[in-house]
Image: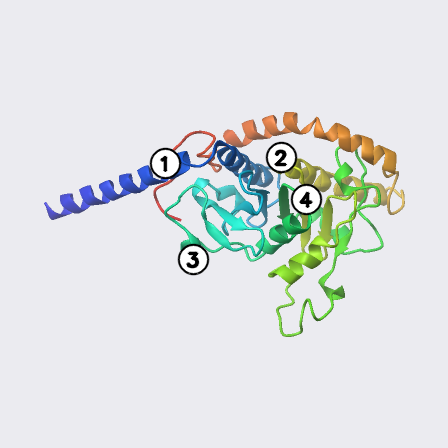
Amino acid sequence: MAYQRTTTLHHFLASFLLLSRLVSAQNVPPSVMSAGIDLLDASHILHFLEVVDAFGHVSLRNPDNSSQFLMTFAIAPAQATSQSIVTYEVENATAVGLTFNSSVVGAATPTGFAERFIHSEIYKKFPDVLAVLHSHTQEILPFANQAGVPLVSQMHTAPSLGSCGAPIFDVRTLPRTVLPDNQLHDLLVRNEALGDALANTFLNDSQVVLMRGHGMAVRAPSVRDAVFSSFYIKLDATVQLQGILLGGGTAPNALNQREVTDTGTTALTLVGRAWSLWVDQVDQIGLYTNDLRNKAAPSPTGF
């Protein structure tokens, strides 16, 4: 009897927790619900497309409050669900609480990514930026590590690299006021000062900054555009490296400024078709769970 009572209590508590999470999710504004759906899809698609692995993260500005952004806590992108999404303050990257579970706030929020300052400082510097992505994409690293060989637009789906190529963020060049000798020199962007230095590295028409020995940061007008850009930046790096091996120089037949501008306009019309395909693809794989878009109940098993 004691065992049965314990089991019944456990089921009751699990059901109560599940119900409270569902109510919390239902109480968010429609714009935030839509943003959460896209954020989860983005995390899963980025893993499916091998832009990220166990590491990397994507965020979007809160459509209901531009002084905040939404990003998962420190979890592999493929494993993100509604109960992984956190609302952060742009001002200092401090966690407000779980976006879709109002019972978890402030210090009770699970640990966030150490490099969330990449996101907060880009949002702070560029008010028109609505999404930010950071990845360790292997294909771009040769260009991040070779300042004399800029990564440039090689294809009409990669205009986000800009007309002059992607700038490089190198912590070795930072003044000691930004990265003192007594701080970790592990290439991670762990605080506001480093995030601000990275944000200041962007060039006017380039939406990406390469990070020496590390990866890249991408800014975008939407989270869907961030995913689209990052995937084709990855492919562009492969195409450019192949062109170099064929003897085409360091930037073989790159797009010129007019082509970058015009393909950028056209690329905005292509995102929807790609997004629809990618969502269908991740939906077929059991690893990925978008419990907001599929109207499934958030997992009651905890964090």
Residue at left offset 64%, top offset 38%: 227
For disc 4, the marked residue is 219
Q: Earlier in the sequence, mark 3 or mark 4?
A: 3
Could you tell me if the residues under marks 3 and 2 are in contact, i.e. CB atoms within 8 Å?
Answer: no
Report helix, strand or loop for mark 3: helix
- Vertical comparison of 174 with 14: above or below: below
* Left or right of residue 273: residue 239: right
Q: CA distance from mark 4 to mark 1?
A: 32 Å
The image quadrant that residue 164 belongs to is: top right
Q: Please tell me how crowded label 3 is: few (under 14), some (14-19), or many (20+) other residues with Cα within 10 Å.
A: few
- Residue at image mark 3: 107
Residue at the left extreme, as displayed:
1
Q: Amino acid at mark 4?
A: Arg
The x and y percentages for residue 12 are 23, 41
The span from disc 3 to disc 2 (Cα, nearest Å) is: 30 Å
Q: Which residue is mark 2?
A: 224
Say what secondary structure mark 1 lies in: helix
Q: Quadrant of residue 41?
A: top right
The amino acid on which the numbered mark 2 sits, given as a three-letter code, is: Arg
Disc 1: which residue: 22
Separation of marks 4 and 2 at Cα, in angstroms: 11 Å
Q: Residues within 10 Å of mark 2 (few under 14, many from 20)?
A: many
Nearer the observer: mark 3 or 2; the answer is 3
Q: Is residue 22 above or below residue 209?
A: above
Res 135 visible: no
Q: Give the residue type at disc 1.
A: Leu
The residue nearer to you, when weighing 98 against 162, is 98
Label 2 sits on a secondary structure element that is: helix
